[in-house]
Image: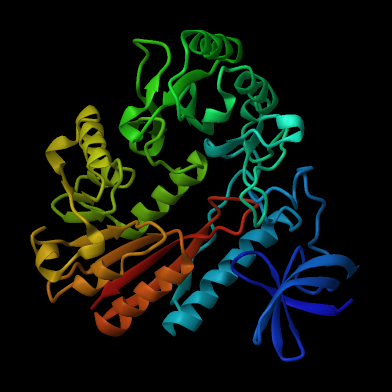
């Protein structure tokens, strides 16, 4: 069996080694370790492999807390010390800037981090009747598989939600058509817990009674989603359709529906907003664009600091939610929310926003390259870019710096998803 000396970690948390002129990406291996490995994919220039035996351990290796680690695909870094996880993500971010954008930031910001366990206030779990003897399984997908992992607990979910996994199996198994429940989505907001079941067929009155009984027993609000996002509704008639999260530093309370997009980690979200406001420095009299604004997560803190905000979002539902949140928080006079496809942004469409002093960009994984290319001579002097993909952030940074005349002042990571290889980051660009 081949043996390798691991040199580094890649963006997916795999150990990287060089063997016979090829890069070998080894799952479960850490930098400095000597491991035996087994390849499951071989190409002329690289191989993908799994660790079979660790011959020499890294001092940063720790025992994974979750018994499902290695099978469940929800986490990939539980075997690495917490501080080392953050350092590895910072390295991934810096490597992306160096290799893709050919850039080095002037300042590396201190990493943002918080609780490492029980942090997920949102989760979308698969449901499948493919267990032994047709038993119902609920959880994340297995690694490199479409199958649902056989989970009876989850360490990154809050304890009271993790404790529901086995009772929820029994509930769904007892429904009239358990094979027609395809997904269970958890949403926590304020003092409420919501569980949304994706039902492919209508439920009987008896089934709905079982859901309500389950909700009463475990203090969780039961919802159904028979179709698209607009079909989501509580089983109990007359129940409040909104949850909320707070941003105490800014005196804000933002409401949302259980299937609306919000950050999964409320603690890190608050710290990330604080960092974004420090870098953006919004002031009364300024006009600031918040692109991919969602339901106002960054827009409202900007407005709370006295600036006028132009929030742009592709989803009409989230744009409406942002306007509602501005009104509820008494900030609607400073906020102007618009629906637009920012992936098709042009210099003309950006110009319709009028004079912009500053801009915040928080796109999905695809990044915001169209927006960056659309910035003209009257582009804002300062841009804060929040990213969930180091590769697309670095690509867009190259456009801003090499084509649009910005300087990359600072970058840093936020550990939004501990135990995973997901890298959330923030960057500051300035012109002139």
In this rendered view, identify the residue nearer to me: 428 or 144.
144
Q: Is residue 43 left or right of residue 255?
A: right
| Image x and y of residue 178, in percent | 58, 25
Quadrant location of the C terminus? bottom left
**At which x and y percent is residue 14?**
68, 67
Q: Quadrant of residue 224?
A: top left
Residue 401 in view, yes or no: yes
Q: Is residue 131 above or below residue 423?
A: above
Residue at 57% over, 38% down: 125
Position of residue 18 measured from the top left corner of the image (x, y, whole percent): 74, 84
Residue at 74% from the left image edge and 50% from the top image edge: 71
Q: Is residue 166 left or right of residue 315?
A: right
Please provide percent x and percent y for residue 212: 51, 11
Structure colour scheme: rainbow
Q: Nearer the viewer, residue 251 or 211?
A: 211
Image quarter of residue 135: top right
Please say whether residue 251 is visible from this viewpoint: no
> Which one is in front, 45 or 390?
45
* Count of marks, rendered view: 0
Q: Farthest residue in the bottom direction?
A: 21
Residue name at image x 31 percent, y 65 percent: 368
Image quadrant holding the N terminus, namely bottom right
Residue depicted at 49% across the width and 27% down the height? 197
């Amino acid at each position: 069996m081949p043996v390798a000396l691991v040199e580094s970690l890649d963006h997916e948390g795999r150990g990287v080694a060089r063997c016979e002129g090829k890069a070998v990406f080894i799952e479960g291996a850490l930098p400095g370790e000597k491991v035996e490995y087994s390849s499951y994919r071989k190409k002329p220039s690289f191989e993908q492999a799994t660790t079979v035996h660790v011959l020499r351990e890294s001092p940063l290796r720790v025992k994974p807390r979750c018994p499902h680690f290695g099978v469940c695909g929800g986490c990939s870094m539980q075997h690495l010390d917490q501080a080392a996880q953050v350092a590895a993500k910072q390295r991934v971010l810096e490597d992306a800037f160096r290799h893709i954008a050919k850039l080095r930031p002037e300042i590396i910001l201190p990493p943002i981090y918080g609780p490492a366990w029980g942090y997920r206030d949102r989760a979308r779990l698969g449901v499948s009747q493919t267990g032994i003897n047709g038993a119902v399984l609920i959880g994340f997908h297995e690694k490199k598989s479409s199958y649902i992992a056989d989970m009876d607990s989850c360490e990154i979910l809050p304890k009271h939600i993790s404790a529901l996994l086995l009772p929820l199996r029994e509930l769904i198994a007892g429904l009239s058509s358990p094979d027609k429940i395809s997904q269970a989505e958890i949403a926590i907001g304020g003092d409420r817990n919501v569980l949304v079941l994706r039902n492919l067929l209508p439920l009987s009155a008896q089934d709905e009674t079982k859901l309500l009984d389950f909700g009463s027993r475990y203090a969780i609000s039961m919802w159904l989603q028979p179709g698209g996002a607009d079909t989501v509704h509580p089983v109990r008639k007359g129940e409040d359709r909104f949850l909320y999260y707070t941003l105490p530093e800014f005196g804000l309370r933002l409401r949302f529906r259980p299937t609306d997009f919000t950050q999964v980690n409320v603690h890190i979200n608050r710290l990330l907003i604080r960092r974004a406001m420090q870098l953006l420095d919004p002031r009364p009299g300024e006009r600031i664009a918040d692109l991919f604004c969602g339901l106002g997560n960054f827009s409202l803190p900007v407005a709370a600091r006295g600036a006028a905000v132009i929030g742009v979002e592709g989803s009409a539902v989230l744009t409406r939610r942002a306007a509602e949140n501005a009104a509820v928080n008494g900030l609607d006079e400073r906020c102007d929310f618009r629906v637009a496809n920012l992936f098709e942004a042009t210099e003309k469409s950006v110009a319709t926003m009028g004079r912009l002093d500053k801009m915040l960009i928080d796109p999905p994984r695809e990044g915001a390259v169209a927006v960056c290319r659309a910035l003209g001579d009257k582009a804002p002097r300062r841009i804060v870019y929040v990213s969930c993909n180091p590769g697309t952030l670095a690509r867009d940074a190259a456009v801003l710096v090499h084509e649009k005349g910005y300087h990359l002042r600072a970058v840093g990571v936020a550990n939004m998803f501990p135990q995973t290889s997901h890298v959330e980051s923030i960057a500051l660009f300035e012109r002139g």
